Structures are given as structure tokens and as C-alpha cells.
Amino acid sequence: MKHIRVLLLLVGILPGMSALGNGKIDLSHGYILENSFARYVFEPAGMGLSAMIDLETGYNHIDPVDGNYLLWEVVFGKGTQRPAIDNNYKPCSYGSVTRRTNGDQVLILEWNDLRFWEEDSICSVKVTIELPENDGVAKWGISVSNQSDYWGLWQVACPAIIGFPASGRYDFAKPVTGTGGHLLKNWEGSLKQRSPSGFFPMQFLSLNSGTNGIYFSSNDGESRAKDFFVDSKDKKLSLIRYPENMGITGSDLPGYYQVSFGPYQGGWLNAAHRYREWAMNQVWTARGPISQRPGFPEIATNVGFWVRDTWVWDLPPDVDKDTGDPFSWRRDERDPHEMNLPFLSAMRTMDVPIAFQWYGWHNVLFDNNYPHFLPPLKGFRERVAELVDSGALIVPYINGLSADSKTYDWYRLDPHAIKDQAGGLHQKFYRDGAGRLTPMCPNQNYWHYTINNVVDSIINVYGANGIYMDEISCNSHELCFNPDHRHPLGGGRYWADGYRKLYRKTLNIAHQTGKQISCDEIIEDLIGRFRSDDNIFTVLMGNI
């Protein structure tokens, strides 16, 4: 029989402990971890977080609950079964605290050799919480060792808190697609949001009751699959990690990254500054501000006006030009120069460089028969040449995530699609009349070359100087269980890594012809993923 081991590590300050000192905790009395800014109270035996107090104001963010408090949760998986345990399943078996020479403190809690479903000593959990000397926000980590001869891990949550946040008591600040963020006053509701995701494009949120704030951020520089979960009705909060090889016998979870969670004084802007300090040290910001990057395409930095439009801009007033209904889009075959006149006129009027995010340039109906965008409509090459020569950034639309499973050669694409644990497709319904758009797995080279063959033609045959790869970062990390894809099943980092590789191939298309191209996107994990000398290609923020 195999063995599973779970350990829980918390970092804190033990009053009276000397530098580099270690102290074993009497778990029957619980533990209080505190410094001059915050106090974390862990109840006896299960060591659930029963109080989280801002010592500047005395404000306790954790309300009383029925039953025991939580600290972590582990869900196992096999087939369709999802049995779960938490920190109250068995009493904590070991705890210690260490003070570092800089005053930071580390509290370690372990649940060792847990018996589960007729297996002895199959699981151990270790959670780590580091409380800095000069801050009330702690850093939490968890690792789960699984030696079961049947079960695999399905998901792991830590911190997993009950008793917070109280409904209507907090202003909730969260990142959102395109517009930066939302500040929801006296928030009531529930949020479960995947990261990485264009719908949740940064890895943090804050909850503030006046100046009494809680900062919540995953410090994941590798962009692994996870969910942020907050529910004000049930007063629950957790960071849910999806392990590699979900549901596979013996799969476990190393402590890949920490989560910043705890009280601070200030509002949502203070939380944003906290996150910025971390984000500015990640790989996606390594090249620094755009204004300081030598060789960055001028056409991308100097755009003063973006136009989002379709094949024809100057429709008569009596024609419905609702671009939200692609089936009403006009496909005139007038003289190319005549159709360009509105854009050329706008450039003269605005007297700034214009970028044109161009829908409807292809023969196929919008959201149908993807990825077969070519050939384009008659006159496309001539229109692109005139607009580019006039100084415009031309960014034709394609879809970099999805293929239409109704297309004639789906049999070629199906092996490379994202599959769920039952082997089904993740098809999306956008509107009646659209195709069966099906996300492809970003790990697959076949898909990379399929999309980049389209990009190659748009750039090198038809002369565009930009490309809009839709949906890649406006969707979330989907869990792929296709066993033929040679990536970990379910969780992991293959989603972001795969799209970085796809973009690398796109960049190589520009390198081979000495051209500059621009691609617009929105998620932080896909910004600046290239070497400092790779400025021929840039990823711009904003799904404009």
C-alpha cells in the first residue's frame, strides 16, 4: 500500500522567541500568531482560523460560525467520485514556529499519515504561513503528498476561510475584462473566477470595510490553474488550486507558490499598489515600460485613435449597422479606394495615427468555419496596402482559441481539441447561427501551425501589419483531460505556456521577413513574454 502525506506550514511570530529560534506548539491550546499589525488566532486541534484582527483598529474580520473553523480543504477524485477532507478531519499532528533573523515568522502545521477510505497513512498536508515583521498580510502555502494506491487529488484549497466576508459589510474591488476593475459597494454575492483568465486578468482582489481592508492575491508567476472563491452569504473565501494529473492515482500537490492574505489599513488603491509591487517583478513585466524598450514598433506606441469596424464603415443611415449582429454586416464589392475613404478621412481629421481592428474581411460568416478565414473578400489586399502606406495599423480579426466543429475537416482538428474528463468537447454557444466553436488545446503544435499559417498569409501575402487573435486571453484556463496531448491532465501551467509558444511562432513569422507586427490582448500573463530584443512583435493590452 502506498502512503499519502499532507503538511501545513504557517509563518508567524512567537512572543519571546529569539532570532533563529524554533518552538514546538502545544496544539491542544491552539495558537496565536501576531506582530504589531495583525493577530491570527487558530483554534485548538483542527487549527482553523477563528480570528483575524487588525491591531491598529482592533477590527476582527472573522465572524462566529456554527461548528469548527476552516484552514484548508482537499478533494480527492476517481471517476465521478469527489470525497473531501479538511483540517478538522483529524487533529493537527505537529506544529512549530520559527523566527527569522529579520523578524519574520514561520508557523508550520502538519497533518501527517492520514488514514482515508480504508488506506493507512496515505495523505499528509503541510501549510505555510509567513507573517512579515513589518506587515499584517501573511503569505500562505500548502503542499499535499499523496501515496494512495487508488485516489488522485482533484483540488486543494488554502487558505479556506469560513466566517468571512460578512454580507453587505465590505466594498469589493476586483479586476475585470478591458476596463481595469469594478468597485462594488457594500457587496453581497458570490464569485468563483478562474485564473489565469481574461475575465479576471490580475491575480488579486480586496475587501474593505472603511479603512479595514483584506488583501487576497495568488503570487503565481507560472500561471497555474486556480480559482478565486468568495461568497458573502455563506461567509467563505478560498484559493482553489487544480493539481497536475487530477484524479490520477497518487497525484499530489507541491507548494508551487504562496498566497498573500490578511488585514491591512487602506482602500482598494492601496491593495492595487501592493499587487503592482509583486507584478512588476514577474516575467511578463521584465522588459519594463513600453516607452523604455528600444526597438519597440513605433506604429504600436503612437496610435492615437482605434477604430473597431467591419468591411464597410460608411453605411447609409437607414441600414442597420449593429456590429453585435454579424449576420447584418454588409459585404460591398465597391472600389477598394472608395471603401477606404472614410478611414483616410478620419486619419486626416484626427491628425493622429489610426489603428483599425478589422472584422468581416473574410469570406466565411463570423463565428463559422474557423479556422478557415482565407481567402479574404475581394479588394482586401488593395485596401490593406493603401491603409498601411498611409500610416495606419491594420489589425484583422481571427480567432486563436476556437475551431468550428461543423467545419468540413473537423476530423483533422478534433484530436487537438480540449477534452473534459469524459472525453467530451468544451463547445461554446454564442448565438443562433454561429458555428459550434470549440476551444483547442494551446499545448498542441498542430494548432499553433494552423493559426500561424493564417497569420503568415495575412502578414506576408496580404500585407497587414497587425493581427487580432481573439478569445485567447478573453477566456479562462480550461482544464484539458485529453491523454494524448502530453501535458499534465487537468491542472498545471500548460495553458499559458502553450499560448506563449504559439506567440513565439507568430513572432518568428515577422523575424523571417523583417516586418513589425502587433497583436492585441488583455491578460497580464501573456504580456511581454518575449526576450528584450524581440520588439518586432508586441502584445498590447486592451480588447479595444
Image: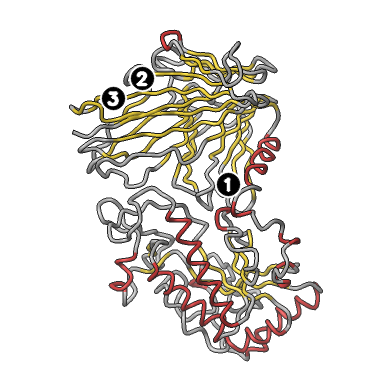
Mark 2 vs 1: CB contact within 8 A: no
Q: Position of residue 265 (x, y in %)?
A: 69, 26
Q: Which residue is at a point 52% across and 24% down the rendered structure image? A: 164
- State the residue position of label 2: 88
User: Cα distance, mark 2 to mark 1?
Assistant: 32 Å
Q: Residues within 10 Å of mark 3 (few under 14, many from 20)?
A: many
- State the residue position of label 3: 114
Question: Between tags 3 and 1, which lies in front?
Answer: 3
Q: Position of residue 536 (x, y in %)?
A: 64, 72
Q: Position of residue 308 (x, y in %)?
A: 63, 69
Task: Identify the element where label 3 is drawn.
Answer: strand
The disc at residue 202 is: 1
User: Cα distance, mark 3 to mark 2?
Assistant: 12 Å
Q: Amino acid at mark 2?
A: Asn
Residue 309, located in which quarter of the rendered image?
Answer: bottom right
Task: Identify the element where label 1 is drawn.
Answer: loop
Q: Position of residue 482 (x, y in %)?
A: 30, 57
Question: Between tags 2 and 1, which lies in front?
Answer: 2
